[in-house]
Amino acid sequence: MRVVVVTGGSSGIGLAAATALARNGDEVVLLGSHPGRLAKAVEQVRDAAGGLAPASYRADFAHLDQVRAVGDKLVAAYPRIDVLVNNAGALAPYPGAATADGNDLTMQVNHLAGFLLAHLLRPALANGRLITTASLAEAWGWLDPKRPAVTGGRYRSRWLAYGASKQANILFTVEAARRWAPAITPTCFFPGLVRSRFVRRSPLFALGSLIPVLVTSPKRGADTLVWLADPATDARPGGYYFMRSEFFATKRATNATRAHDLWEASLAAIADYQP
């Protein structure tokens, strides 16, 4: 039985993917920040798994110490992890919101926390897959790869911060493929515009109204994730996917120099982690 760790697994795409993976026979491990939603997610995944309750861990990715703590627990509990799904995401309530670690809130939750967790779990992920939830929003990302987590002026809008974090997701995947493949297969994907209050506030929602194929349900949005998690899928390390096919990304999101710079700056941002 494969072990699949899903962050942001208590709702939306993460929960839909976890449910499908459990139904397929995988041992799913859920990570979430809200205890009530996490408990309900455990019930849903348990039903899909035929009564086998999934393990669940609570961690708020706005606190890097909680990411480190849950990483340690996962390493102790699972000497082998077949798939890590970096799906946890957030949109700051206002521009320039910062975490206790001093980082931009959106950037930390959407990129730095997953970057840290992937490093912590890397030994257990040997011969496994790393899948990150990205977005078409990367197209408007004003990311400075040498200072990704800076708070304040660069992200004058919380949507600019969100776009920058999604650009970081793709750059992380590109550089992880260069450094870690073929031992680990890193990929990322765009799930589409999953119907939610979050998406309806997004600038992408106007685009989605013009291109209906972009608007989808959590189940359909999770389909590419589940496909990428399948060991039978011949996914290209560093690839970016949508609807089970390679997708386009801006040059800013795929540039090798920017990917390298972001990696080094991200290591510095998580400070006390020693690779």
Image (cartoon, helix red, strand yellow):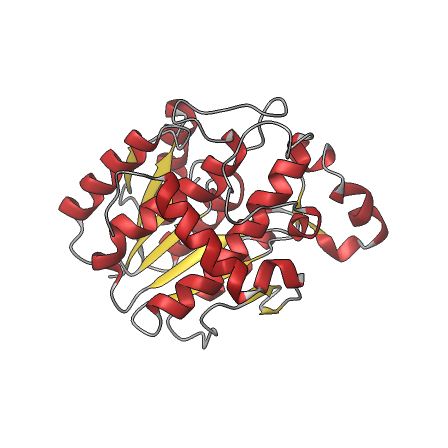
Pinpoint residue 50: horizontal percent, then vertical percent.
32, 49
Please identify the quarter of the rendering in which residue 131 is found: bottom left
Q: Is residue 202 left or right of residue 186?
A: right
Residue 225 appears in the rendering: no
| Foreground residue among 34 and 181 | 181
Please identify the quarter of the rendering in which residue 67 is found: top left
Number of numbered callouts drawn = 0
Q: Is residue 115 left or right of residue 183?
A: right
Residue at 69% over, 30% down: 157
Quick one: quadrant of the N terminus? bottom left
| Foreground residue among 43 and 37 | 37
Residue 269 appears in the rendering: yes
Q: Is residue 196 left or right of residue 2?
A: right
Pinpoint residue 66: horizontal percent, then vertical percent.
30, 30
Residue at 25% over, 42% down: 71
Residue at 50% over, 47% down: 146
Q: Is 273 located above or below residue 84 in the figure?
A: above
Pinpoint residue 116: horizontal percent, then vertical percent.
34, 45
Residue at 63% over, 47% down: 217
| Foreground residue among 232 and 248 | 248
Pinpoint residue 114: horizontal percent, then vertical percent.
40, 45
